[in-house]
Amino acid sequence: MGANKNLSIEESEQFSIENPLYEQNSPKFELIGKLQRKELRLSYTKLKHLSSPINFMDAILNPKKRNAGMSLGSVVDCLLLTENEFESKFTVIEHTPTTDKQNEFVELVFKKMNLEPIANLEAKFKEAITEGFSRVKTDGLEVYCKAILEGKEVISNDMYENAKRITENLKNSDEVCDQLMQVEDFQKKLEFNYKGWNFICYLDTYHKNGFDDLKFASDCNPDKFSRDIEKFGYDIQIGVYAIGLEIIDGNFNPIVNHIVYDAIGNYAVLHIDSAYVNYCKKKVDFLIACVDKMVKENGYNKSYNFFRNRNTIYKPNWSKGFDMTMFED
């Protein structure tokens, strides 16, 4: 193990020599080292960005902020599945920093609170106001700072009320309740090694025969959501989870369902066909092979053609034909 790790460190140093654009100890250089030593834990959220090495590296180095839809989905998941954990995960607040000055002020508070106990927040908050922010509206921002420092996600009262309404609707659904009655565990953590890489994932629900995954969608019409599965990388998620259950539980054919809901009251329990689940596992195998190729060939700055022999665009099915009969005599 030690010899392999040392070899990878040497490879990282050689990579730096051959690629002077990557400074040693830079975030990208350190990420490359983790990849070469296989210290980076993979997940579906990482693998879904493997359309190109550039996209993969950028998604890890510059993660996107959660949008409102993602936050709403997380709140509903918590209220429906693990309501007792809501207060430890979320804080409902009225005021968030919305101006540049307010954001600058909040950053100063966080800087002052570095390594400080949460009990010192009030004093540090008042101290920050005296340092050029006396005219900035700071009402309610102390609650915001406290929530962030405690590692909680802050949500508005409107989002909370909306999430409660959606949750009650799902609880009153016979189809959803029947599905959840089979559950043995919620937010089950899976950690496993596959093809030399360590994986971590969390199942929304777990039972002896498989799992369910909750999804908030702008449109949960089953025909629309079937296309969203590939669009948003949910097929990769299915594959990773199924592989994890295969390794940990010896379940080679898990029953997989998506419980999909939208903001206006629609919902659907969608069963994923076993042949599709097997396809999803094969897709994960392909993506892991892509990671291995990228690492082996130092292709961290390559683009779309790196994972394909060639890119060919075919005529789409929706392209209109031509009526040539109008030209006939």
Image (tube, rainbow, N blue to C red):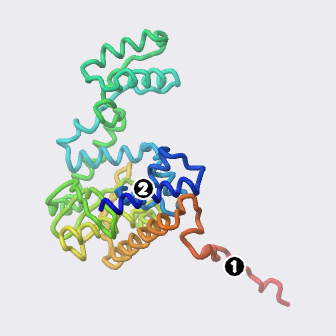
Residue ID at (39%, 17%):
139
Residue 245: x %, y % from top left: 23, 68
Which of the pair 262/39 is nearer the observer? 39
Q: Amino acid at mark 2?
A: Ile
Residue ID at (37%, 44%):
71
Quadrant in which the N terminus is drawn: bottom left
Residue 103: x %, y % from top left: 47, 25
Res 326 seen here: yes
Residue ID at (49%, 44%):
26
Residue 145: x %, y % from top left: 35, 26
Residue 321 numbered mark, or none: 1
How many angstroms separate mark 1 from mark 2 (CA)?
Answer: 57 Å
* Secondary structure at numbered mark 1: loop
Q: Residue furthest right?
A: 329
* Secondary structure at numbered mark 2: helix
Q: Establish if 165 lies above or below 147.
A: below
220 sits to left or right of 92: right
N-terminal label among 1 and 2:
2
Are the two marked residues, 1 and 2, in contact with CB atoms closer than 8 angstroms?
A: no
Q: How many marks?
A: 2
Q: Nearer the viewer, mark 1 or mark 2?
A: 2
Q: Establish if 278 lies above or below 262.
A: below
Q: Amino acid at mark 1?
A: Gly
| Residue named by callout 2 | 9
Q: Establish if 295 lies above or below 98.
A: below
